Image (tube, helix red, strand yellow):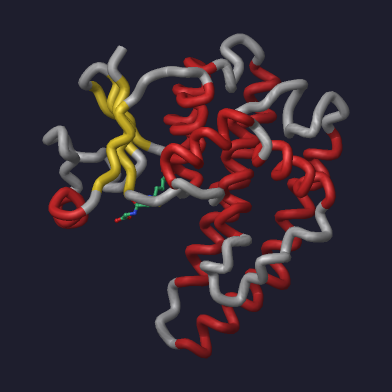
Amino acid sequence: MKITLYYFKIPFWRAEVTRLSLFIANIPFDDHRIEGGEYEEFKKTGKLPNGKIAPFKQLPVLEVDGKIFAQTGAIARYCGKLSGLYPKDDDYKSALIDQIIEAAQDINFLVTLSSRDKDPEKKKIARDILANRHLPKWFQYLENLNSQNDQSVYFVGKDLTIADLAIWRLLGWLTSGLLDGVATNILEPYTNLTILRNEIYSNPKVIKWMDQVYGKVI
Ligand SMILES: N[C@@H](CCC(=O)N[C@@H](CS)C(=O)NCC(=O)O)C(=O)O
């Protein structure tokens, strides 16, 4: 099986959840990061370096043995099944993981909305609302769900799943300082989410990945 993941040259959760899931399970894949001329072509036409058009003219896109499909959740689940980080035969457990991935999508959308206004004053107001209303609400939802799992520090069951990787990387972005108006210590009140993040940051395969690909902790 030949797997290629197409995404931009950033460690964003939409791609990183899949990259890490495959890396953790030692599944070889081509981590194709679109930049330069390929990026220009993709932005203009939606054409991927393999000549196919991305279904929604968005990334990520996964190619498996010459066939492609898109959407973060679909890709993460497909690769999660290959890597053992998503169940193949437990519908309830799958749904518990899915609801976390969908929550990541909802949070991402709120961030996107808060970035849309070009007017600096309006953007500042939107970011204030994001940082002081939306994000605390959603973090508390995630904190509650995480605390309901009494089997481990992870969101679902005893072991790491794609839900944990998705949220870990999403939270890494939200606390990176890259988003104006969102403080880097915004997660401090959420004990379980902090424990989860620390757990993943100390996962030997995650450390190896960050070291190998980024040369630093991200
Ligand atoms: N619903 C899609 C959203 C994907 C998405 O928004 N991708 C962004 C990059 S993070 C993109 O390709 N943007 C380029 C564009 O929309 O033109 C998913 O879950 O994968």
Residue 114 as seen in the image, left or right of residue 149 = left
Task: Please tell me whether residue 3 is drawn above or below residue 165 in the rendered image.
Answer: above
Relative depth, front residue between 133 and 37: 37
- Viewer-nearest residue: 92 or 51: 51
Q: Is residue 153 left or right of residue 79?
A: right
- Residue 50 quadrant: top left
**Could you tell me residue 116's position as x and y percent?**
44, 73
Q: Residue at x 28, y 37 (%)?
A: 32
Image: 77 above or below 211: above
Q: Which quarter of the image is occupied by the N terminus?
A: top left
Query: What residue is drawn where x is 62% and y is 44%?
Result: 167
Toward which corner of the image does residue 61 lie, by quadrant?
top left
Is 121 on the left or on the right of 103, as rendered?
Answer: left
Q: Position of residue 105 (x, y in %)?
A: 54, 48
Please name the residue shown 48% across and 63% down the image: 112
Task: From the top left corner, tell me how far across and down residue 121 is, in percent.
Answer: 52, 90
The percent coordinates of residue 101 (x first, y second) are 58, 39
Q: Is residue 218 above or below residue 164?
A: below
Residue at far bottom of view: 121
Q: Image point 63% across, 27% down: which residue?
A: 161
Question: Would you identify the image quadrant in which residue 176 lies?
Answer: bottom right
In the picture, measured across the screen, residue 204 lies left or right of residue 41, that is right
101 w.r.t. 45: above or below: above
Looking at the picture, tell me which residue is in the foreground, 56 or 85: 85
Label count reads: 0
